[in-house]
Structures are given as structure tokens and as C-alpha cells.
Amino acid sequence: PHLKSVLGGLGAVCRRFCSVLCASSIMSSGVVLEDGILEKFNEMKLKHTKRFMVFKIDGGKIVLEADEPKEKTYEDFVNALPENEPRYAVVDFSYSTDDGRPQDKLLFIAWSPDNCGVKPKMLYSSSKDAISKKLTGIHKAMQINDSADLAHEEILKSVK
């Protein structure tokens, strides 16, 4: 009888462990990348034809919301992000090195403002891998929750 209770308790522990393990491995939301996004990203990466691309989740897909040419500025990028909704973005960030050389770095930004709802934050957080792992050649991936952290100077600190 004692062995049965020990084994029964062990079974409960195993079932609990398996449910936690399975749940943690299925943390993605099932959101997929819309066709054509990787081609546009690769053009941006290889030819430096775009200043930024902004993506949103719509109908279970990550879709391109904005696709702006190189002539646009970093400030145009910041203004393209909604104040109270999450977005993903890739920006070709231009700056000068300490010795005056011009540099461009591709940054992936997961924008999730503090004032958006919990559901959108969770959806974007659990879907981030669907896009970030496919965009190869990104210099730095950043999670930004406050508009003050989007300031050119703040981004520059983390890039240098």
C-alpha cells in the first residue's frame, strides 16, 4: 500500500512537470509572417533602399504597415509608431562614429508602449520570434516600452 501512494504521488509530479514543460514549449502565438516580407527585408539589408519598415499583427499574420525610403529620417520612423499600440520595426539607423565615420546599422525594435492593453502586449510578446528569428543580419534587437527610450541619443548609446 505504501508503494502505491509513493508511485501515485510520483505520477502526479510527472504529470505536472510534463504539463509545464509542454506549455513552455508552445509559448508562440501561432502568428505567421506574411509572404513577401523576407524579400523586402533582404532588399533593405543588401541595398540599403529603405529607412524603416513597420509591421503589425492583423488576422493572425505579421503584415507590413509602413515601408519608407532611405530619404526619410529617424524622426519619421519614430512618428510612424502608434502611441498606444505595439509594433515591430526594422530601422536602418544612421550615426557617426567617435572618429567621424558614417555608419548604418539595422535594428529590430519591438515597440510595446506601457499604455497599451495587456492582450496586445501578450500577443506581440509571444509572436516576436515569428519575425525576429527570420530577419537575419540584424545588428541589434531591442525591446522598447517608453517613447523616451526611442530618442535618437538613447538608441545611439546602445548601438555604439
Image (spheres, rainbow, N blue to C red):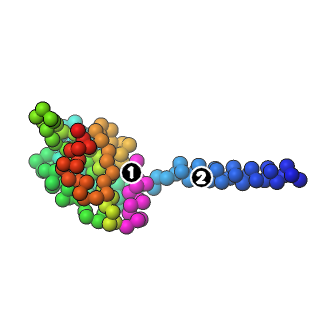
Residue 39, image x, y percentages: 28, 42
| Foreground tag (1 vs 2) | 2
| Image quadrant where one finds the C terminus | top left
**Could you tell me which residue is drawn at 23 percent across and 47 percent down?**
155
Q: Is mark 2 on a helix, strand or loop?
A: helix
What type is the residue that disc 2 sits on?
Val
What type is the residue that disc 1 sits on?
Lys
Residue 134, image x, y percentages: 36, 42
Q: What element carries label 1?
A: helix
Residue 11 seen in this snapshot:
yes
Q: In this view, does 85 lie above or below 37?
A: below
**Observer-nearest of 77 and 150:** 150
**Could you tell me which residue is drawn at 22 percent across and 49 percent down?**
154
Residue 124, image x, y percentages: 38, 57
Whether tag 1 and tag 2 are in contact, CB under 8 A, the answer is no
Q: Does the magenta stretch include residue 7?
A: no
Q: Which mark is residue 128?
A: 1
Q: Is residue 148 above or below residue 99?
A: below
Q: Residue 20 carries which label?
A: 2
Q: Quadrant of residue 42?
A: top left
Q: Does the magenta stretch include residue 118?
A: yes
Q: Is residue 67 above or below residue 160?
A: below
Q: Which mark is residue 62?
A: none
Count of numbered badges drawn on the protein:
2
Is 12 on the left-hand or right-hand side of 153? right
What range is drawn magenta here?
Answer: 117-130
Residue 64 seen in this snapshot:
no
